[in-house]
Structure formats: structure tokens, C-alpha cells
Image (tube, grey):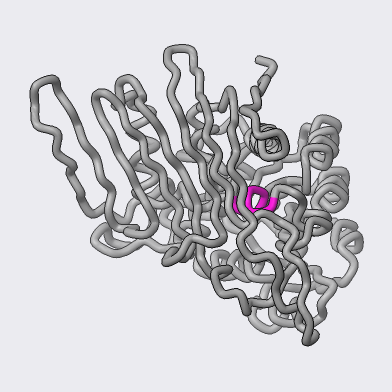
Amino acid sequence: MSRQTIRFGVIGCGLMGKEFASAAARWCHLAEVEFEPSIIAVCDANPAATAWFTKHVPTVQHAYSDYKELLANPEVDAIYCAVPHNLHAQIYVDIIEAGKHLLGEKPFGIDKQANEQINRALQANPEVIVRCSSEFPFFPGAQQIVQWVEEKRFGQIIEVEAGFWHSSDLDKTKPINWKRRIATNGEYGCMGDLGMHVLHLPMRFGWKPSSVRALLSKIVEERPDGNGGVAPCETWDNAILACDVNTAGQSFPMLLSTKRIAPGHANTWFIRIQGTEFSAEFSTKNPKQVASLPYEAGQPQAWHIVDAPYKSAYGTITGGIFEFGFSDSILQMWAAFCDELTHGRGADLPFRCVTPEEAEASHLVFTAALESERTGNTVKLNWGE
């Protein structure tokens, strides 16, 4: 099968840029896809970061320190951009105006105003396909829950809980970084860093909060600054958002949480849905297992826990008995993005990456959460629909 090659540039050659390079290198893992990425250009202000790519990625032909030089390269079709939040508006807008397709990191702007700048550029350049990074819903267990929601298995929704937790910040000796500073991370704190992962499926299901009551926590007040002193931690460590959801047919509570300090958790993403006819939950804490509870009136209530087979949105060469992991979810996300670049935004994809509209919705939720924290009130959201 011949494949269409999509020529990528990477802006921001850190951890996630390397994950993309790894995914591109193992593209043969995917079965029967008509497209493949090729990273031909990279850019980072740190020469050591681009040097890793030129050493390990044989397709790289160009290395830049100025991203505008990369954008001027006519050979580049699309961009992966992973930079601190304060740089999103300027760089994302420049990418879009250069006519390059974009997969960008969340939260798509340091705040709501920055996100609006990005959306204005999108409206002026409708031919450019832009998506936001969020890989965890590509886990097989999450995809099984997506299928159950699409099949309307749950009956009346009783409640929903979704979250993303990790715990490395429990170590108070961990040096401060840009995610602990408002100037680079934004006031959202952990919500901006982790929240799009949590909202990806609820937004995809149409479960937009009609109100938000936020409980935000700053747990570690200062950290080593790397120079023998200490620096204040300005951003929120943990966030719990209690939401009301009102759809056309029903109303239910939804609890969303993003935590940088959740003892014992290393990147635990989860979703739990309780309904009158069916309940289900999946967590990357136990990535092979998905739990469900079908219910009929008068019958026993029993949870069923089964191993989820190695089966996600896009087929692979791996047998169903094996384990699915983080690098597999990254590969699946990239397959979805490249599929859309190949077949167009109207194509019938197995599962889509986060859309700009969903990223915009997350900003409305996070902005409401900040207002709720300041005032102590429940904040209403107006979706203008």
C-alpha cells in the first residue's frame, strides 16, 4: 500500500517532541493506514534539543533556532508545537497564518484572551486544520467507554467523574519550573496543564457544564530555584470542579479534577460514568482493565471487570492479548491527526483529536473556575447555543 507522506516541523524539541519522533519511527506498528509523518525540520532555542533530533531522526534535514525560519520553509506541510503556554498565542497564530496545519499542546493559549487570538486566526484561515494534543482517550478502555456512550447504554446519567492526577510535585525538593509561574503557565495552574485531558471526552459527548464551583489548592508554597535559593510557587497545584450538566434530555452532576499532588499516582487518567441502566469506568492506573455494571430492575448489581484487548481507534500489528501503554496512545493520536490531514476535516474518522472548539470550551470552564475561587460562588456558564 502506498502512503501519503506528511512533512512535519517540530517547534519545541523537549519531552513531547521526542515522543512524536518515537511515534513516527514506529509507524510500521499501524496496520493499513494510507499516510505517514516525516519530521524534516526542527526548532528550539536550545541547540542541544535540536541536536538530539539531528542525531536520532534521520529524516531531519533542517534545524533552526528561530521558528519563523522553519515556517518559511515551503517543504513543511504541518507543525507540532510544544512550547510554554505564554508562547501559544504568538506562535500558534504565526503557524496558522503561514498556512501550516497544526497539532498544538494544550491549553491553546495561556488564558481565554490568548485562546480568542488563536481562534480569530483560524477563522481567517479556514483551510488550515488545527487540533489539540490529548492522547489518553485513545487507550482501549477509554475507547470502549466511548462506544458505550455512542450506543446510549447508560440510560439516565446519574453522575460523571473524570480526572488526571500525578504526584511528582509531592517532593518539595523538586526544583521550580515554568509550570509554577503565572507568567509562563498562566493563572489556570494545573487546569491549563492537565485539564484538556480531563475535558476531552465530556466535551466530545456534549456534556458542557452549565455551572462550576471550584476548589483550588496551593499546597507547596515555594521550591528550590536551582541557584541555591528558593522561589515562590504561584500557580494552583490541585483543582476540583463541581459542575452541573444540562443536556437536551437530562441533568446530572459532573466532578472534574486535575492534580499535580495526588500521592501514589503517576499520570493517572480516569473517567467514571454511572447510569440507571449501565455504569462503567476506566483508569490508566489499571490500563488493561475496564469495569462495567449492566442493570435491569430487580436484578443483582454486580461489577464486571475484564481485560481490555489491545484495540484502539486505529488497527495495529500487536495481538489483542498484549498490553497497551502511553507510547501507544501517542501513536494513535498522531494517526488520528494524520488521517484528518489526509482525508479532510469532514472525513469519517474512528476518533478525532481535540478540536479548537473543544479547546475553547475548556477555557470557558477554567475561567469560570478562577472566578469561582475568587468569589466563593457557583459560576454560571453561557454557551451561546
Residue at far bottom of view: 228
Q: Quadrant of residue 322?
A: bottom left
Q: Nearer the viewer, residue 40 or 172?
A: 172
Q: What is the x, y in percent for residue 33?
A: 48, 51
In the image, 218: left or right of 284? right
Q: Nearer the viewer, residue 24 or 158?
A: 158
The segment highlighted magenta reads: 189-194
Q: Residue at x 76, y 60 (%)?
A: 84
- As for residue 178 lying within the magenta part, the answer is no
Q: Quadrant of residue 67?
A: bottom right
Q: Quadrant of residue 117?
A: top right
Q: Residue at x 42, y 49 (%)?
A: 270
Give above or below for 125 relative to 327: above
Q: What is the x, y in percent for residue 115?
A: 78, 40
Residue at far top of view: 249
Q: What is the x, y in percent for residue 261?
A: 54, 62
Residue 147 in view here: yes
Q: Residue at x 49, y 56 (%)?
A: 165
Give above or below for 83 relative to 61: above
Q: What is the x, y in percent for residue 338?
A: 60, 49
In the image, 286: left or right of 177? left
Query: Does the magenta stretch mainly form a helix, a strand or a loop?
Result: helix
